[in-house]
Image: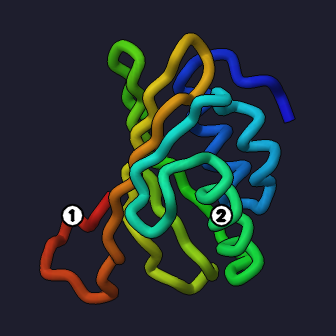
Amino acid sequence: MKTPRTRKDIARAFLRRAATGKVREAYELVDPGFRHHNPYFRGDADSLRKGMEEAHAKFPRTAIEIQRALEEGNLVAVHSRVKHAPADAGFAVVHIFRFKGMRIVEFWDVGMEVPKDSPNQHGAF
């Protein structure tokens, strides 16, 4: 895997590695003081890492389709479709990363399940 060179590349690499079960590789991109805001886990790096590893064990076919990435100052936001199986509609997710230099120090994620039948002709993406 090539070395990410920009903050957007680092954020995308973190997500791709985590989604494909390479969670420990993903965590090579985080700062030792990393914290996150996922309400289902304690706010430390180890708790989220373990949760990501358990999620991959439960959903080994998870895939992420990154739609767009935006960068402003030390923040990067990535809008993606996350699917646990190829036939799933998946989830629309926005991951927000705060960087210190080129290391991820803080992380937020918000998402919604993509409805199979939506009246919105533009969809979630």
> Would you call the spot at circle 2 few (<14 residues within 10 Å), some (14-19), or many (20 or more)?
some
Residue shown at 81%/43% (left/top)?
A: 25
The residue carrying mark 2 is 52
Judging depth in this view, the residue of 9 and 23 nearest the camera is: 23
* Residue at (56% x, 48% y) in the render: 44
In the image, residue 95 sits, relative to residue 84, either above or below, namely: above
Q: Which residue is mark 1?
A: 122
**Which quadrant holds residue 54?**
bottom right
Q: Residue at x 42, y 58 (%)?
A: 38
| Marks 2 and 1 close (CB-CB < 8 Å) | no
Location of residue 105 in the rendering, given as x and y in whole percent from the top left corner = 53, 29
Residues 65 and 6: in front is 6
Determine whether 69 is above or below 17 in the image. Answer: above
Tell me where residue 114 sits by quadrant.
bottom left
CA gap, disc 2 to disc 1?
31 Å
- Marks 2 and 1, the one that precedes in the sequence: 2
**Residue depth check, mark 2 versus mark 1: number of the one nearer the observer:** 2
Position of residue 41 measured from the top left corner of the image (x, y, whole percent): 50, 64
| Disc number placed over residue 14 in the picture, else none | none
With 122 as the anchor, is 115 left or right in this view?
Answer: right
How many discs appear?
2
Q: Residues within 10 Å of mark 1 (few under 14, many from 20)?
A: few
Q: Indicate the secondary structure of the residue bearing disc 2.
A: helix
| The N terminus - image quarter | top right
Q: Residue at x 35, y 76 (%)?
A: 113
At label 2, the amino acid type is Met
Q: Taking 6 as reference, is 2 above or below it?
A: below
